[in-house]
Image (cartoon, rainbow, N blue to C red):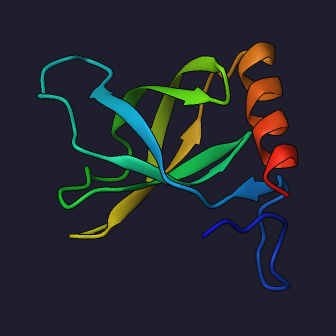
Amino acid sequence: MCYTGRMSDDKRASRRVMNVIDVDCRTEDGVEAPVAARISDLSATGAFLDSMNPLPAGTRLVLRFMAGPREVRVAAEVMHSMPSFGMGVRFLDLSAEGAAAIEALVREQS
């Protein structure tokens, strides 16, 4: 299933795509083991990561995933966590190239 755009009650400013994308997800400090997760909702400002064991809000992560043909590597912060469901993350240092790759993916799947 793929959804792009904004819902009427959605407060997000960036267009997004809902599609499953594999992600390498690790804590920023490297103390914890990799987190089993996949992206189900992606925009240039953040993502929702499906995970049975989401991390608490405030946790810093390093994410690596493919946006079309380009690999994106970005630091992120967990903004909200839903036990046994997943976590919403905000990107902290997305490069211009990474943002362009995500925006191209969103346009392509619109």
Task: Give me the residue at 38% from left, 47% from top.
Answer: 38
Whether 72 is drawn above or below 23: the answer is above
Whether 11 is drawn above or below 103: the answer is below
Q: Nearer the viewer, residue 105 or 96?
A: 105
Residue 46 x/y as whole percent: 62, 45
Task: Give me the residue at 67% from left, 65% from top.
Answer: 2
Quadrant of residue 8 within the rendered picture: bottom right
6 left or right, relative to 51? right
**Quadrant occupied by the C terminus:** bottom right
**Quadrant occupied by the N terminus:** bottom right
Whether 3 is drawn above or below 73: the answer is below
Task: Give me the residue at 41% from left, 39% from top.
Answer: 22
Q: Nearer the viewer, residue 109 or 34?
A: 109
Residue 63 x/y as whole percent: 44, 27
Quadrant of residue 105 within the rendered picture: top right
46 left or right, relative to 85? right
Quadrant of residue 100 within the rendered picture: top right
Residue 41 x/y as whole percent: 58, 57
Q: Nearer the viewer, residue 102 or 68?
A: 68
Whether 64 is drawn above or below 50: the answer is above
75 left or right, relative to 81? right
